[in-house]
Amino acid sequence: MRIDIITIFPDYLAPLGLSLVGKARESGLLDLRIHDLREWATDRHRTVDDTPYGGGAGMVMRPDVWGQAIDDVVSQGDMPPHLIVPTPAGHPFTQRTANDLAAEPWLIFACGRYEGIDARVVADARTRMRVSEVSIGDYVLNGGEVAALVVVEAVGRLLPGVVGNPESLTEESHGADGLLEYPVYTKPPSWRGMDVPDVLLSGHHARVARWRRDEALRLTARRRPDLLARLDPATLDDHDREV
Ligand code: 6GU
Protein backbone atom coordinates (compact mmCIF):
# COMPACT_ATOMS: atom_id res chain seq x y z
CA MET A 1 0.00 0.00 0.00
CA ARG A 2 1.08 3.56 -0.70
CA ILE A 3 0.22 6.43 1.68
CA ASP A 4 1.06 10.11 1.14
CA ILE A 5 0.52 12.70 3.88
CA ILE A 6 0.47 16.42 3.10
CA THR A 7 0.92 18.69 6.16
CA ILE A 8 2.55 21.94 7.27
CA PHE A 9 4.11 19.97 10.18
CA PRO A 10 6.01 17.01 8.68
CA ASP A 11 7.81 16.52 12.04
CA TYR A 12 4.46 15.78 13.68
CA LEU A 13 4.43 12.50 11.74
CA ALA A 14 7.84 11.33 12.96
CA PRO A 15 6.26 8.47 15.00
CA LEU A 16 5.42 6.76 11.69
CA GLY A 17 9.11 5.77 11.54
CA LEU A 18 8.68 3.68 14.73
CA SER A 19 7.20 0.38 15.85
CA LEU A 20 4.90 -1.61 13.61
CA VAL A 21 4.34 1.06 10.97
CA GLY A 22 8.07 1.83 10.84
CA LYS A 23 8.81 -1.87 10.29
CA ALA A 24 6.11 -2.11 7.62
CA ARG A 25 7.88 0.73 5.77
CA GLU A 26 11.32 -0.87 6.10
CA SER A 27 10.02 -4.20 4.82
CA GLY A 28 8.38 -2.54 1.81
CA LEU A 29 4.81 -3.47 2.81
CA LEU A 30 4.03 0.22 3.19
CA ASP A 31 5.34 3.02 0.95
CA LEU A 32 4.71 6.10 3.14
CA ARG A 33 5.74 9.58 1.98
CA ILE A 34 5.33 12.82 3.91
CA HIS A 35 5.11 16.17 2.09
CA ASP A 36 5.46 19.72 3.41
CA LEU A 37 2.51 21.76 2.09
CA ARG A 38 4.68 24.89 2.10
CA GLU A 39 6.62 23.45 -0.84
CA TRP A 40 3.57 24.46 -2.89
CA ALA A 41 3.29 28.00 -1.52
CA THR A 42 4.17 30.61 -4.10
CA ASP A 43 5.13 33.71 -2.13
CA ARG A 44 8.29 34.65 -0.27
CA HIS A 45 6.68 33.96 3.14
CA ARG A 46 5.41 30.55 2.00
CA THR A 47 1.87 31.52 3.00
CA VAL A 48 -0.73 28.72 3.09
CA ASP A 49 -3.69 30.51 4.73
CA ASP A 50 -5.81 33.65 4.59
CA THR A 51 -8.73 35.33 6.40
CA PRO A 52 -12.18 33.72 6.12
CA TYR A 53 -14.82 35.19 3.78
CA GLY A 54 -17.84 36.18 5.86
CA GLY A 55 -15.63 37.06 8.82
CA GLY A 56 -14.99 35.17 12.03
CA ALA A 57 -12.03 34.01 14.04
CA GLY A 58 -8.98 32.24 12.70
CA MET A 59 -7.60 31.54 9.25
CA VAL A 60 -8.61 29.26 6.38
CA MET A 61 -6.17 27.26 4.25
CA ARG A 62 -5.96 28.48 0.66
CA PRO A 63 -7.46 26.36 -2.15
CA ASP A 64 -4.77 27.25 -4.71
CA VAL A 65 -1.92 25.89 -2.57
CA TRP A 66 -3.84 22.75 -1.58
CA GLY A 67 -5.12 22.14 -5.10
CA GLN A 68 -1.63 22.23 -6.61
CA ALA A 69 -0.20 20.03 -3.83
CA ILE A 70 -2.86 17.35 -4.33
CA ASP A 71 -2.53 17.51 -8.15
CA ASP A 72 1.24 17.06 -7.98
CA VAL A 73 1.12 14.14 -5.54
CA VAL A 74 -1.66 12.46 -7.54
CA SER A 75 0.40 12.84 -10.74
CA GLN A 76 3.20 10.79 -9.15
CA GLY A 77 1.04 7.66 -9.30
CA ASP A 78 -0.62 5.67 -12.03
CA MET A 79 -4.04 5.16 -10.43
CA PRO A 80 -6.63 7.37 -8.72
CA PRO A 81 -5.95 7.55 -4.96
CA HIS A 82 -8.50 7.74 -2.15
CA LEU A 83 -8.20 11.17 -0.51
CA ILE A 84 -8.68 11.23 3.27
CA VAL A 85 -9.39 14.60 4.87
CA PRO A 86 -9.27 14.48 8.69
CA THR A 87 -11.76 16.95 10.18
CA PRO A 88 -13.85 17.08 13.38
CA ALA A 89 -16.83 17.55 11.01
CA GLY A 90 -16.11 14.23 9.25
CA HIS A 91 -17.81 10.83 9.32
CA PRO A 92 -16.83 8.84 12.44
CA PHE A 93 -13.70 6.72 11.87
CA THR A 94 -14.33 3.15 13.07
CA GLN A 95 -12.77 -0.30 12.78
CA ARG A 96 -15.00 -0.83 9.75
CA THR A 97 -13.50 2.28 8.09
CA ALA A 98 -10.02 0.94 8.91
CA ASN A 99 -10.88 -2.45 7.36
CA ASP A 100 -12.20 -0.77 4.20
CA LEU A 101 -9.19 1.54 3.85
CA ALA A 102 -6.76 -1.36 4.36
CA ALA A 103 -7.99 -2.81 1.05
CA GLU A 104 -7.07 0.36 -0.87
CA PRO A 105 -3.86 0.55 -2.90
CA TRP A 106 -3.27 4.29 -2.34
CA LEU A 107 -4.37 6.81 0.30
CA ILE A 108 -3.52 10.53 0.39
CA PHE A 109 -4.10 12.43 3.65
CA ALA A 110 -4.69 16.18 3.47
CA CYS A 111 -4.03 17.48 7.00
CA GLY A 112 -5.63 20.87 7.64
CA ARG A 113 -4.79 23.31 10.40
CA TYR A 114 -6.42 26.53 11.59
CA GLU A 115 -10.17 26.71 10.88
CA GLY A 116 -9.84 24.19 8.06
CA ILE A 117 -9.29 23.98 4.29
CA ASP A 118 -11.31 26.08 1.79
CA ALA A 119 -14.35 23.89 1.00
CA ARG A 120 -13.70 24.01 -2.76
CA VAL A 121 -10.63 21.78 -2.38
CA VAL A 122 -12.73 18.75 -1.39
CA ALA A 123 -15.43 19.61 -3.95
CA ASP A 124 -12.82 19.77 -6.72
CA ALA A 125 -11.04 16.59 -5.63
CA ARG A 126 -14.37 14.69 -5.64
CA THR A 127 -14.64 15.24 -9.41
CA ARG A 128 -11.53 13.10 -9.90
CA MET A 129 -11.15 10.68 -6.96
CA ARG A 130 -12.92 9.23 -3.97
CA VAL A 131 -12.79 11.55 -0.94
CA SER A 132 -13.58 10.72 2.70
CA GLU A 133 -13.79 13.37 5.39
CA VAL A 134 -13.25 11.50 8.68
CA SER A 135 -13.31 12.40 12.38
CA ILE A 136 -11.58 10.31 15.03
CA GLY A 137 -13.96 11.36 17.83
CA ASP A 138 -16.12 14.05 19.36
CA TYR A 139 -13.44 16.48 20.50
CA VAL A 140 -11.36 19.14 18.77
CA LEU A 141 -7.70 18.76 17.79
CA ASN A 142 -5.54 21.57 16.46
CA GLY A 143 -5.09 19.88 13.11
CA GLY A 144 -5.44 16.68 11.16
CA GLU A 145 -1.94 15.32 11.85
CA VAL A 146 -2.73 13.36 15.02
CA ALA A 147 -5.87 12.00 13.36
CA ALA A 148 -3.75 10.89 10.37
CA LEU A 149 -1.40 9.11 12.80
CA VAL A 150 -4.40 7.31 14.28
CA VAL A 151 -5.82 6.27 10.92
CA VAL A 152 -2.44 5.16 9.51
CA GLU A 153 -1.76 3.02 12.59
CA ALA A 154 -5.24 1.47 12.57
CA VAL A 155 -4.97 0.72 8.83
CA GLY A 156 -1.28 -0.22 8.78
CA ARG A 157 -1.67 -3.02 11.32
CA LEU A 158 -4.31 -4.64 9.08
CA LEU A 159 -2.01 -4.94 6.05
CA PRO A 160 -1.10 -8.57 5.37
CA GLY A 161 2.23 -9.41 7.02
CA VAL A 162 2.41 -6.34 9.31
CA VAL A 163 1.08 -7.96 12.50
CA GLY A 164 3.11 -11.12 13.24
CA ASN A 165 0.21 -13.24 14.48
CA PRO A 166 -2.94 -12.50 12.43
CA GLU A 167 -5.06 -14.19 15.12
CA SER A 168 -4.41 -11.21 17.37
CA LEU A 169 -6.47 -9.21 14.85
CA THR A 170 -9.53 -11.43 15.25
CA GLU A 171 -9.78 -11.41 19.05
CA GLU A 172 -9.72 -7.76 19.99
CA SER A 173 -12.01 -4.92 20.96
CA HIS A 174 -14.14 -3.71 18.03
CA GLY A 175 -13.27 -6.96 16.27
CA ALA A 176 -15.60 -9.26 14.38
CA ASP A 177 -17.91 -10.04 17.33
CA GLY A 178 -18.63 -6.32 17.93
CA LEU A 179 -17.75 -6.54 21.64
CA LEU A 180 -15.09 -4.94 23.80
CA GLU A 181 -12.27 -7.35 24.57
CA TYR A 182 -12.30 -9.53 27.70
CA PRO A 183 -9.64 -8.85 30.40
CA VAL A 184 -6.30 -10.64 29.97
CA TYR A 185 -3.77 -12.01 32.48
CA THR A 186 -0.24 -13.39 32.53
CA LYS A 187 2.20 -14.64 35.19
CA PRO A 188 2.48 -14.49 38.14
CA PRO A 189 -0.77 -16.28 39.10
CA SER A 190 -1.05 -14.21 42.28
CA TRP A 191 -0.01 -10.53 42.42
CA ARG A 192 -0.66 -7.95 45.17
CA GLY A 193 -3.34 -10.18 46.64
CA MET A 194 -5.18 -10.63 43.34
CA ASP A 195 -5.47 -14.07 41.74
CA VAL A 196 -5.87 -14.87 38.06
CA PRO A 197 -9.42 -16.30 37.58
CA ASP A 198 -9.31 -20.07 38.16
CA VAL A 199 -10.97 -20.90 34.85
CA LEU A 200 -7.97 -19.50 32.94
CA LEU A 201 -5.67 -21.97 34.71
CA SER A 202 -8.06 -24.90 34.14
CA GLY A 203 -6.86 -25.83 30.66
CA HIS A 204 -10.51 -26.32 29.71
CA HIS A 205 -10.78 -24.56 26.34
CA ALA A 206 -14.57 -24.48 26.09
CA ARG A 207 -14.92 -23.04 29.61
CA VAL A 208 -12.23 -20.45 28.92
CA ALA A 209 -14.01 -19.41 25.73
CA ARG A 210 -17.34 -19.16 27.58
CA TRP A 211 -15.80 -17.10 30.40
CA ARG A 212 -14.16 -14.70 27.94
CA ARG A 213 -17.40 -14.23 26.01
CA ASP A 214 -19.32 -13.54 29.25
CA GLU A 215 -16.71 -11.00 30.39
CA ALA A 216 -16.76 -9.30 26.98
CA LEU A 217 -20.57 -9.09 27.09
CA ARG A 218 -20.63 -7.71 30.66
CA LEU A 219 -17.91 -5.13 29.93
CA THR A 220 -19.61 -4.00 26.73
CA ALA A 221 -23.00 -3.71 28.48
CA ARG A 222 -21.48 -1.58 31.22
CA ARG A 223 -19.20 0.69 29.20
CA ARG A 224 -20.66 0.71 25.70
CA PRO A 225 -24.37 -0.14 25.76
CA ASP A 226 -24.54 1.53 22.33
CA LEU A 227 -22.36 -1.26 20.88
CA LEU A 228 -24.46 -3.97 22.50
CA ALA A 229 -27.66 -2.47 21.07
CA ARG A 230 -26.15 -2.65 17.56
CA LEU A 231 -25.26 -6.37 17.74
CA ASP A 232 -27.02 -8.66 15.31
CA PRO A 233 -29.35 -10.73 17.57
CA ALA A 234 -28.55 -13.78 15.41
CA THR A 235 -24.97 -13.71 16.79
CA LEU A 236 -26.24 -14.15 20.40
CA ASP A 237 -26.79 -17.60 21.91
CA ASP A 238 -29.13 -18.45 24.82
CA HIS A 239 -26.35 -18.19 27.36
CA ASP A 240 -25.44 -14.69 26.06
CA ARG A 241 -28.94 -13.47 26.84
CA GLU A 242 -28.60 -14.53 30.49
CA VAL A 243 -25.32 -12.59 30.96
CL1 6GU B 1 -9.91 14.26 12.11
N1 6GU B 1 -9.29 16.66 13.03
C1 6GU B 1 -9.32 17.61 13.97
N2 6GU B 1 -8.73 18.78 13.74
N3 6GU B 1 -9.96 17.47 15.11
C2 6GU B 1 -10.56 16.30 15.32
C3 6GU B 1 -10.56 15.27 14.40
C4 6GU B 1 -9.90 15.48 13.25
N4 6GU B 1 -11.26 14.23 14.88
C5 6GU B 1 -11.66 14.62 16.08
N5 6GU B 1 -11.26 15.86 16.35
Image (tube, helix red, strand yellow):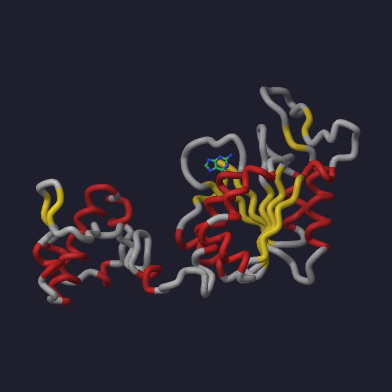
Looking at the figure, which quarter contains the C terminus? Answer: bottom left
Q: Position of residue 85 (x, y in %)?
A: 64, 50
Above or below residue 83? Residue 103 is: below
Q: Is residue 212 above or below residue 146?
A: below
Residue drawn at (37%, 69%), measured in percent from left and top? Answer: 168
- The image shows residue 81 at horizontal and vertical percentages of 71, 64
Q: Identify the image quadrant of the N terminus.
A: bottom right
Q: Is residue 226 left or right of residue 70?
A: left
Q: Nearer the viewer, residue 181 or 28?
A: 28
Quadrant of the picture in which ligand 1 is shown: top right
- Extreme residue in the front direction: 188
Picture coordinates of residue 38, whole percent (x, y): 80, 41
**Residue visible at 42% across and 73% down in the picture:** 166
Please state the horizontal and vertical placement of residue 228, each as a whole percent of the image: 28, 57
How many discs appear?
0
Question: Taking 206 as reference, is 30 above or below it?
Answer: above
| Residue at image location 77% in from the left, 61% down from the top | 128
Query: Seen in the image, is 50 located left or right of residue 20?
Result: right
Residue 42 falls in which quadrant of the image?
A: top right
Residue 10: quadrant of the picture: top right
